[in-house]
Structure formats: C-alpha cells, structure tokens
Image: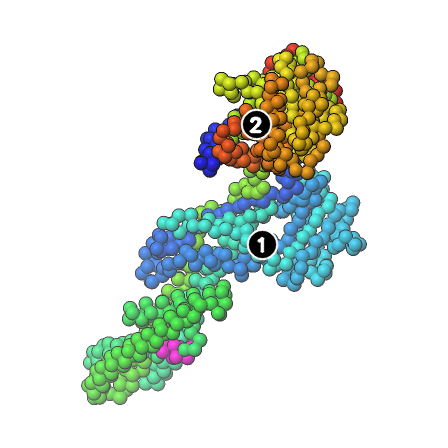
Amino acid sequence: MNNELNQDANQQQESSFDIKALLLRILSIWPWILLSIAVCLTFAYFHLRSTEPVYQAKAVVLIKDEMKGGNAGIDNVVLQQIGVGGNGVMLENEIEVLKSYDLMRQVVKASQLYLSVKHEGRISEHTLYGTELPFSWEIANPDTLGSYKQWILYKDNSKWMLKTSEAAKASEIQLGKWYSIDGLKCRLWPNIDNFGASKKVGFWDSYNIVIAPIDDATSQYLGALTIKIVNENAAVLAISVLDKHIVKAEDAVNSLVNLYNQLGLSDKNRVTENTMDFLTDRLEVVEKELRSVETEVEKFKSQNNITDITTDAQQYMVLATEIDRQKAMQETQLNIINLLEKELVINQQDPKLVPSTLGIAEESMSVLIGRHNELILARDRMKEKAGTLNPGLVDIENQIKDIRVSLITNVRNLKESYKTGLNDVEKKNSMLTNRIKNMPALEKNYLQITRDQSVKGQLYLFLLQKREEAAVTLASSIPDSRNIERARGIGQVSPNRNNIWSIAWALGLLFPIGGLIIVDFLNNKVGDRKEVEHKTKVPLLGDIAYVKNLDNPLPVLKGGRSVIAEQFRTIRTAISYTGKGKKVKSILVTSHRPGEGKSFTSLNLAASYALLKQSVVILEFDLRKPRISKNLGLDPKAGISTYLSQSYDIPLDDLLEKIPNYEGSNLYVLPAGPIPPNPAELIHGEKMPLLMAELSKRFDFIIVDTPPFSVVTDATLLQQFVDISIVVLRQGYSFKAVYEELNNRMVQYPDNPIYTVLNGVGRTQRYNAYGYGYGYGYGYGYGDGYYDKEKSKSKRFWKKA
C-alpha cells in the first residue's frame, strides 16, 4: 500500500507537468540568457572574422564508356572500316586514376599548388592568388623541400626585400635573378598585368609566403578532392576541390582534368605506336629485297636484249603469276605467324604489347591479341598506381599468362594451316614448272626473276597499307573524357555564416536553460506548494513566506497586518476544518530535520489562537535542544522534564511561564526544563497522560513543539496525545526524501491525522519564478494596503528553530 501511494503521487505529478511554470522559471533567469547569448554571438563574430573562408570549385566530366553510350568516335564509318574504334572503360577505375597520388602530385607541381601567399590582416590572414599579386615565384627544385618554409616578402620603396625567418636579416631580391634560399633555387618575376600597381586597392606592401613540401601539399589536396558519379545511368563525374582561394581551386580542378586527359591519350596511343614501329622495320627489309629483285630484272633484260615474250609464255605467265601470288600470300602469312610466335616466346617471362594490325585473317586471333594488349595496359597502370604487391596485379598477371598460352596455341595451329596451304601451292608450282620445262631457258630465267619481283612488290604494298592504317588510327585518337563544364566556383563552404550564427543563438539559449534544467533536475530539496501537494498525499494547511528582515520571533501580534500574520491566520482557519465537526484542541508541531522552522511555527500558531482570546499553552517538548524559551528571553529552572521525572506532583503554576511583552495574558509556555538523559522514557512514562489531562482542563489550545521526527522518536510517541500533527517543511532546505516518509507515516499511523506547512517560501529565486515570491510581503496580489512591511533586521529565528 505504501508503494502504491508513492507511485500514485509520482504519476500524478508527471501527468500535471506545468509548462507555464517552466516558462516562468526560464524567464526568471533572463539576464543570464541575455548574457549567454551576447557571449556566444561575440564568440561567433570573432570566429567568423578569424577563420579564413574555404571555397569549392567543381567541374563536370563525361567519361566515354561504351557501356553507357559515351564513345563518340565509333560513329565514324571510315574508322569502322579500317578497325579503328574506342575501347570501353570502367567508370570506377577512372575515378581511382583521378584520385591517384601520382596524378595529384603532378598537378601540384605543374600548378605550383605547394606555394601559398597570404596577407595578414588585423584579425585573420587572407590567401592571395593570380591577378591579386604583383609578382610570381618560380621554384626550380620543389622536390628537394623537406619541411615547411615561411618567408616574408615586402616592399621597401621600390625594392623587394625577403626575410626567411623572424631572426634573419632582410635581403634584397632582384627581379628575374636566381637565388638559393633555404635549399630552394628560386627567382621572383613581375606579374606583367599588375606589377607596379602598388597603389591599387587590394595590394599590400607585405606578403607571407608559405612553401609546403610536395608530398604534404599532395596529401592536402587529395583530402580536399571529391569525385562523385552524377548519375548511375550516365558516365558523368563531378570533380570538386576545396581551397582557401576560389580561383586557385578552379585552377586545381582544371589542371587535374587536363593532365588526366593527356595521360589517358598517351596510354591509349602506346599500342598503335608499337604497331607502327614493327611495320616500319619490316618495310625497310622488304624494300631492300624488292630493290634487289628489280635490279636483277633490269640486268637480265639488258644482258639478253629482251623486249617481248611469246603468247604461250604469256599464258604460262598468267598462270604462274596466280600460283606465285598464292604462294606469296601463304609465305607472307607464314612469315607473320613465325614473327608473332617468336615475339610471344621471347617475351614469355616479361609479356609486352603485341602488334594488332598485321593483316591476320583469323578473327579469333585478332580478338585474343586485342584482349592481350588491354591486359598489358591494365597491368602497367596498376603497377604505376598501386605497386607490384597489389593482389589485383597478381590476378592480371595470371590472366596474361593464360591468354598468352592461348595465343601461342592458336599461332601454332594457324602456322600448321599455312604450311599445309603452302605445300598445296608448291605442288601446283611444281606442276607448272614441269609444263614449262620445254620453254627456252632464257624465258624460264626471265619468268623466275619477274615472279620474285611480284612477290616482293605485293608484300611491300601490303605492309605499307597496314602502316598507313596505323597512322590514321594514331591521328584519330581522342581522349576518353570530355569536359561538360569547366571548373567554376560554387561559393564558400566554410565557415557557414548562417550555421555559425544559428549555433551561437542556440548555444546562447542552451547554456543557461540547460544549466537551469540540470540544476533543477539535481535539486533534492523541497520545492513549491504545487510540488508538495503532488508528491505527497499529506494535506497542506498553508505556507509561510520568507521575510528578509524580521527582528521579532512573534510577528503575529494584535492588529498586525504582516504577510506572516495573515498566513498563520489562514493556517489556523485550515486547522479548524480538520476536526470533521470536532474541535481540534491539541496540535503537535514537528519537522523532518532541524532548521525547518517548527519552533517558529509553534510559537506563532499559538499566538494566532491567543488573538482569539483563547487560553493557549506551548509545550516545549524538544527536550534535547529547547529553543523557544531561549529565544523568548526566558530562563526557567524547571519545566516538563522536571514534572515528568519527579515522583511527586509539582504544581503547574510553578512551571508555566507567561510570554513576556505580548498583548493579553492568555499565552503561556511550559518550558522544557533541564535536559534529561532519557527524554523518550519520560514521554513514555506514567505522568505524561496526567500532564496532558491537566493542561487540557486549564487551556483551550495546546501546541506541542517536538524534535524532528526523523532524528528521534519523541514526536511519534507524543502524537497519541494530540488531535492532529503538523510537519513543517522548509522550501529549498528540506530534503525531498521527506515525501516518502510522510506517505509512510500516513499508512503506519492512520488514526493520527498528519498535515504539512511549507515554511520559508520565496527565499530562493528558483521558486520566485513560479509565482511564489513574497519579498517583503507583496506576494499574493492583494495590494500594498493589506500588509505591513517588515522593516527591521531579522535574526531569522525560523531558520534557527
């Protein structure tokens, strides 16, 4: 039942969360909120002023991927007829190439991205670039730089002076002259468009020059580089770079795209260049052989004075020519196959590119050669980008070995086929030779020479044609990418001014409000009236305001109109309704812990009854630490402890003390007397009922002041002799654990009614915000005419009691 009572109280509080009270609480700390916002906005302002902006430049590039319709060159009909066309590319591979370290390193060197020129302002530095500078630096050996260098270049009249460190002496720099500075070979050049315009707005006399190592600058720009696929269905990439100068960022992106195109085109032309070299070498050999045969023909005719051949000889010549043509073709194909086989066998351990346009009629062979060359190029690119230990490189090497095995097998099969064809031609040739045996020896020799001439001429023309085709392929080669949008600045990306200001406002509100919420959450002290009513089922009779200056422990006086006097009258009225038709005559006043104001409450509650011309007695049952007599200026020698400890009856008139300086003669105190060693035993003794019975006869009201119930058991023992018990709680002082204990006491002692009074209301600013501030007595809204102001300084009796 106890647990259910506590849970019910907690649930009731949670369900009645007062948003208005929270807003009033927040409004109560408005000076701190304004101060916090002002501080955060000031920090935001200086952060924006001291932080150099970062800009972004972006370019859009089309990668010509056959799989996604990006190859424009394949539409050329002439190129299709001679076998010239683009190869499809993998978009992911091209992204990795663009993000490769070596490519970015070349960009950094080519565009001097390792060099930064800044102007130091009053709060922050500003990066200058391009036309904003009246000069340009040329560094011949940037690769030798091992650490950052910071120089100061300034103009002294018409001279340019350079300081390499704070301690170094400035040296004059002459334009166009090479200098060795900190291991760097460099010289200063004038910017032709801007040099001499030192009076121009935006030009300064001093510049901070920062030179970064190539590797550090490369890593920095790789970190600032972003490459995204614009559309999954299109081979389009968006390339962006972050930099502290917008034009510098644009130059970095353009330089990266241009260098990527150049390297791609160079890589693409390697196969064609190797094929042309092979054809050129063969043409030189065949040309020599052709010239030798032509010389023999000329010599034979000259020696034998031959001008015409007989008709029969001409017929045999036609037939022989056809056979010789077939033989020449077979020999040519066989020679090419032999050369290709030799090439594949020699380079078995270190595979290289294989000429692709050799005129081999076999389609499968051309496909294998093309695939082989693609793998060789892929291997070379991966070696440059990822090194020899990359797992993907091993896979490509294995593919190359497999395809070369297939190539060698196909070459040898084709070789046997050509040998068979050549043997057939040889047989035909042998038959023709037999037929012309009867020809004159002269004609026979002439025919042999012309046949050799025809074979060499056809071979020469064939090789020459293939070389021209390769030259057309090389001339028509275009990059695998095209700029859709050149690099352009898209604005400042950091610091984001709107976000910074928004964050500053948010933090300005968050710090004080969050601190307020945390403090309230961690607060374990009793709060306002609403909290007491929701946390416990014990009825609250009323509250007592905190008054800063109070010099009288009895503010409840005849004719008094102070806040406290009215509040005690309210509590007195509330008590009259607790008897359920019966008069409440005896009232026990206690607290949870010392210092909560129970003695102050007991004294003034008794005074409020005395104002009704009722006889009232205050029993000072705080036998261990009596306070009432002391604060009233009484010094009794005997009291309650004397009465309860003596075996004989002591007249009460000898123990009762009339409260001095109080209007009327009906308010008395029964002092505690000497501090006994056994207060609980005295209360539990036989004389206690007699004492209460005698006092009940003599007085209209009995107020019993007891020790805190959580400290000693006296209050629990005395509650059987009273009509009701009042527990005094003090706002901002009593622990919230008292709520549970009060609920427990209601369950444990159902026959002893218990009530609470909230003391010290309004002292803490926290609760003033919720509408419970009293100050000097103006908390209830009745107007200045209803209460007297408390003017004198207080000894804060209610704090001590």
Q: CA distance from mark 2 to mark 1?
A: 86 Å
- Specify the label residue 220 is tagged with: 1
Determine the secondary structure under disc 2: helix
Q: Is residue 559 above or below residue 764?
A: above
- In the rendered image, which quarter is residue 445 located in? bottom left
Residue plotted at (24% across, 81% down): 420
Q: Identify residue type, mark 1.
A: Gln
Res. 374 visible in picture: yes
Coordinates of residue 481 in the picture (x, y in percent): 44, 54
Cβ–Cβ under 8 Å for marks 2 and 1 = no
- In the rendered image, which quarter is residue 474 located in? bottom left
Q: Identify residue type, mark 2.
A: Phe
- Specify the label residue 69 is tagged with: none
Mark 2 vs 1, N-terminal side: 1
Q: Is residue 433 above or below residue 3?
A: below
Q: Is residue 335 above or below residue 484?
A: below
Can you say which quadrant of the picture contains the N terminus? Answer: top left
- Return the residue nearer the eye: 729 or 131: 729
Q: How is the image coloured?
A: rainbow
Residue plotted at (75% across, 28% down): 637
Residue plotted at (67% across, 13% down): 558
Coordinates of residue 506 in the picture (x, y in percent): 57, 35
Can you say which quadrant of the picture contains the C terminus? Answer: top right
Q: Is residue 639 left or right of residue 539?
A: right
Q: Is residue 301 above or below residue 122?
A: below
Coordinates of residue 278 in the picture (x, y in percent): 41, 72
- Return the residue nearer the eye: 225 or 765: 765
Q: Main secondary structure of the magenta part?
A: helix
- Magenta region, residue range: 340-347
Coordinates of residue 158 in the picture (x, y in percent): 77, 46
Q: Which residue is mark 2?
A: 721
